[in-house]
Structure formats: structure tokens, C-alpha cells
Amino acid sequence: MDYTRALAEAISPLCNLPAEEIEAWFETPKNAEMGDLAFPCFRLSKVLRKSPVEIANNLKCAVTLPEGISKAEAVAGYLNFYVDNACFAREVLSSVFEKGDSYGGADIGRGKTVVVEYSSINIAKPFHIGHLPTTVIGNSLANIYEALGYKVVRINHLGDWGTQFGKMLCAYEKWGEKPIEQYSVREMVSLYVRFHDEADRDESLLTQARAWFHRLESGDEKAVSLWKKMTSATLNEVSKVYDRLNVRFDSYAGEAFYEDKMPAIIDELRDKGIAKLDKGALIVDLSEWNMPPCIILKSDGSTIYATRDIAAACYRKATYDFDKCLYVVAYQQDLHFRQFFKVLELMGRDWVKDCVHVNFGMVSMEEGTLSTRHGNVVYLEDVLNAATSKTYEIICEKSPELEDKRAAAEAVGVGAIVWNSLYNSRIKDTSFSFSKVLNFEGETGPYVQYTYARASSVIRRCGQVDCSSFDCEKLTDPYSCALIKAIETFPEQVRQAAEKNEPYLVSRAVMNVCSAFNKFYYEVRIMADDHCERGARLALTAAARQVIKNGLTLLGLKAPERM
Ligand code: ARG
């Protein structure tokens, strides 16, 4: 229901101005007692040649109130309008019940494709806490775009190429103790660490590693087969973490995938005179834009990270014909993205304007949060395990009678970690401690999930909720009104989250629904004796529960019925 629009249309004939113009003048009164929408009458002083106070008084008598507006009051040159709360409640709740799981979604993306690249972990390297934001921000953006009707392609741009694989192969050949497919990531990492230790003493290892990488590049059967096994062993292991995080991908086309797609790009850059030789390397000079050059080929002729990104962008455009391509990557790589986007622009790829680097800040853990036995690398899996077992203890204490405590602890423990990365503007550096993220009373994932479980339990206890007929006049107390308002703003926040690529707008909107629901829960007796009151309040509870669930789902968290 667009009240502003309807009011503008009602006022328009009274002052002979187009409704579109008038619509933009409405304001929201600072104080809720002054109504829901205010029309500043001084805007009409010139046209009507009267004082704002006079105009306000005249308009009040002349205007026909549109449906859903209960009254108008002239105050100090303003005409304040009051929304009919019962009517508003009916509109909002029926929209929630009608849309159900898709409330918050829309079809503004119909026919459009968004590529979302996220997580992009490195093969044979730890899946560490630094990958948490990209993984969960990317996943929730993908969910949000999908809910808005876009076709979404989820890509994990694996770091599966580069000279470090020569070192890995060399180390494995020398010190490998069992079939490579039986190696855990931690074991692969220690092989790599050992390589560096020994290479400090024996430089010939570096030459051997280069030879191994050369074998890999030229398709040598043994090298390729070992490398493939390393990749699948890594993916096998991380897929467990992805499952726990509710994260999935449509494509794992990583850096290696672009090996055979680079020569065409390199030729084009040369032929068009965009790239030039500089001390044996092929570079694109970007000094005009105050950036260091983008290196395309090193002096030994090998390609680098940026070359692969240029090829990947072109491939994605050709394959998916995206309307938008998001790269969810830490801000440390800001320069890299500006550089290769500029190179694409110089190549005449005007679609590069649709490529967006969705950057984010760092996560760190407060001192003593987790002991790091493996140097200073914190494995994400260890963080999830610790969160889950701490949550298990809390649940045993809070709800000893709960049946499936392990499952609840998994949903809430993992959810707490995910929520923490999605509750602030992405660019902020964040730190966390378990006591903060697992605080059931703070603005945390557990608080939201707990609110969801609470609403679910109310519904369970009452048996049936009648979502089709309830008396909206019973939902006009301030607590119900505030909750209905919070529910009503949810879909707009989902749209905003996509527009700004900021999932925290969704988590804030869910948090608003939760705090409004909890106030409602404490202040208003849901199980009222009056049959009508109870019916209406249960319907509102059911609507709030639905919105919390939809929000949790968009963010990638589970919605536990009990906890
Ligand atoms: N694998 C890289 C890393 O862990 C991130 C890749 C980012 N994506 C890209 N298209 N460059 O640092």
C-alpha cells in the first residue's frame, strides 16, 4: 500500500499540481504522535498565495482521505496524516501469509543474471578464518539476488594454479608417505612448509620445483594427475565446512581453468598496443590513472593472477552474459581489481562497468579466543567446532530437556559465527570472541534464532492459527503496531541489500523484527482470554515468525524450531 502516492493523488486536484511533484514533498514526522506522514504546506504558498497555516486548514477540510488513512490534522503549517493501523495490519499480514517463504522477495531481477564469485579458496592451503567473510557475504548476496528473481551463478574461483604447485609436487615426490588423495589439508600444508625450510638450506630444490611446475604446465601425465588429486582432496575436505555453512556453488572453475583462455587475451593486448614490453615483461602501463602497471606476463613468460582474472571476466561474460558480476574479495585486493578492471576497459569491454568488487574488512579473534596450534593460521573448521561445543554446553544448561541438543548446537553455534560476519557494514574490520557471538541476549545470531524458536513454541502450544480471518482492530496497541511496521520494512531492506551489496541491511531488518517481537511478547498477552484478541495476536506471531525465518534463510542460517 503506497500511502504517499494515494495522498499525493488526493491533494493534486486541490492545488492543480501533478501528483508526482507533490509526492516528493511528504516527510515523516519526527514524533510518532504527530502522525505517519506530514505534508509541508509552505510548498504551496506561492501557487495558492496563502499562508501555510491557512493552506493546511483549508486542505484538511477539502481533502478526501484515501483508504487506509484514518485522519488528517493541521498543525503549524503542516497537514499530518494518520495511517489506519488496523487497515495497515491487515495489508501487511495478508502479504506475509500470501507470500510465505518468499515474503521479502520480488521479481525485479526477472530475466537478469548475476554472477557472484565468493569464497575462492586456495588448493592445498588452509580454509582459514580470513575466508569467512567472503564465503558468508557472497552466499547471502547470492541468496538475496535469487529471492529478488535474478538468475544467480555462484562461482568458487579456486586458487589452483601457480608456481607453488611445483613446490608441492616436488615436496610430495621427496617426502610423500602415502597416496596423495589420503592427505588432509593440514598434511599438505606441512609438506609445503617443509619444502620452504629445506629450500633455505638447499637451493637446488627451487630449480626442481620449477621443473615440476613446467611439467604441470605442459600437461605431463604424472604431474597433472597428482595436482588433480590434491584439488579433489582439498575440495572433499572443505565441502564439509561448506555444508555446515549452507553454502554451495554452481562452478568451481578456478585459476587453472583459464590456462588455455589466456593466449587470446595476451595476443589482443599486444595487437591493440595496450600492453608493451618492459624489461622483458609484458605490462599495461596505468600511470595515467595513478596506478602501478598491470603485469600480464612476467619476464620468464609466465602468466600471473591478473592475467587469469582478465581471462575469467571475459569468459564469464561470454558464458553467462551477466548483468552484474560481483567479486566478494577482501579490501587488500582493491588495487588489483582497479587495475584489471581498467585493463578490461582499455580493451573496449564496456561491460566492465557491471563488474563490482564487493570488498570487506578483516576478521580477527580477540586474544585467547582459540589457541592456534598451527602457527597463526586459524582454521575455520576449528572455529566452527569450538562454537558448536560451547553452544552445546549452553544448551545443556538452558534447556536440559531438549531432545536433539547436538543438532540445535550445530545450528546455533555455526549461526553465531556466520551472523557476526553479516551484522556490520562489510568494510568494517571485525573481531570476535565466543562470549560475544554466543551471547543469547546480545544482537547475535543465537538471539535471533532463540526468538524464532520462541515464536514457534507459541504457535505449537496454541495448535491452529487462522491466517485468513483475524480481527485487525485488535492489533492497534503500540507493541503490535511497532512489530507490524518492522515486518513491513523487511522487503524494502532486502532490495536495498542487493542494491548496495550489503547483507547487513537484511540482518538489521531481522533484528528489528526480533526486538519488536520480544517487546510484544513481554508486554502483550498473546494467549488472551478474549477469543478475538488471541486470534489476532497469534496471527501476528505467525507473521513475525515467518519473516524471521525468511531473513535467517537469506543470511544462510538455520531456523531451529526448538532450542
Ligand atoms: N584465492 C584468492 C585468495 O585466497 C582470492 C581470489 C579472489 N578472486 C579473484 N577473482 N581474484 O586470496
Image: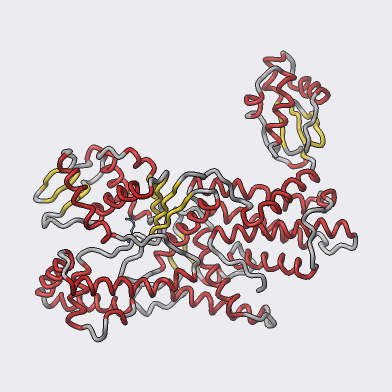
Q: Is residue 542 above or below residue 167?
A: above
In this orientation, which residue lies closer to the viewer: 177 or 284? 177
Residue at point 74%, 15% (across, down) = 50
Q: Based on the displayed image, in which of its 4 quarters is residue 461 positioned?
A: bottom right
In this orientation, which residue lies closer to the viewer: 73 or 341? 341
Residue at point 73%, 24% (across, down) = 11
Direction from residue 334 to residue 525 in the image, left or right: right
> Looking at this rendering, what residue extends furthest in the right direction?
530
Q: How is the image coloured?
A: secondary structure
Direction from residue 190 to residue 399 in the image, left or right: right
Residue at point 56%, 65% (across, down) = 557
Task: Write down which quadrant ligand 1 falls in.
Answer: bottom left
Direction from residue 244 to residue 461 in the image, left or right: right
Residue 8, image x, y percentages: 70, 28
Direction from residue 160 to residue 222 in the image, left or right: left
Q: Based on the displayed image, in which of its 4 quarters is residue 232 positioned?
A: bottom left
> Looking at this rendering, what residue extends furthest in the top direction?
49
Give the mark count.
Answer: 0
Residue 88, image x, y percentages: 76, 44
Residue 267, image x, y percentages: 16, 46
In this orientation, which residue lies closer to the viewer: 368 or 553? 553
> Looking at this rendering, what residue extends furthest in the bottom direction?
177
- Quarter occupied by the C terminus: bottom right
Residue 155, image x, y percentages: 39, 58
In this orientation, which residue lies closer to the viewer: 247 or 250? 250
- Quarter occupied by the N terminus: top right
Residue at point 27%, 51% (across, down) = 311
